[in-house]
């Protein structure tokens, strides 16, 4: 199959997969970062940049 996001060819276990595993992980990280920003907004805290946040996530 061809990834709809990056265009690479990948093997899919399900016919439902539209993106490769690399893009899927990136999309999941983006969604988690959006939730983090919402959480910061609700608690009136200053959010980290996305790069800082991703580095924090890697350390956990």
Image: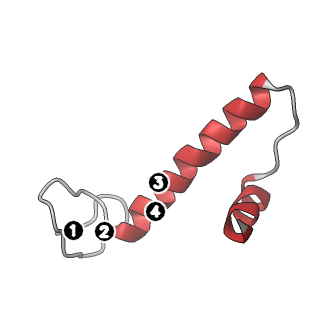
| Residue underneath mark 2 | 7
Query: Where residue 22 sits in the image (x, y, percent)?
Result: 42, 70
Looking at the image, is mark 3 or mark 1 earlier in the sequence?
Answer: 1
| Residue underneath mark 1 | 2
Query: Where residue 33 sits in the image (x, y, percent)?
Result: 63, 46
Q: How far apart are labels 4 and 2 at the CA level? A: 15 Å
Depth-wise, is mark 3 or mark 1 nearer the camera?
3
Element under label 2? loop
Query: Which is nearer the eye, 3 or 33?
Result: 33
Element under label 1? loop
| Residue underneath mark 3 | 27
Looking at the image, is mark 4 or mark 2 earlier in the sequence?
Answer: 2
Quadrant in which residue 2 is drawn: bottom left
Looking at the image, is mark 3 or mark 2 earlier in the sequence?
Answer: 2
Are discs 4 and 3 less than 8 Å apart at CB?
yes
Instruction: Report the side of 3 relative to 22 (left or right).
Output: left
Category of crowding for the residue at label 2, using alpha-carbon neighbours closer than 10 angstroms: few (below 14), some (14–19), many (at least 20): few
């Amino acid at each position: 199959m061809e990834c709809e996001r990056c265009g690479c060819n990948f093997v899919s276990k399900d016919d439902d997969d539209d993106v490769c595993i690399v893009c899927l992980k990136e999309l999941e990280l983006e969604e988690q970062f959006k939730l983090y920003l919402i959480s910061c907004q609700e608690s009136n805290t200053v959010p980290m940049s996305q790069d800082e946040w991703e580095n924090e996530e890697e350390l956990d």
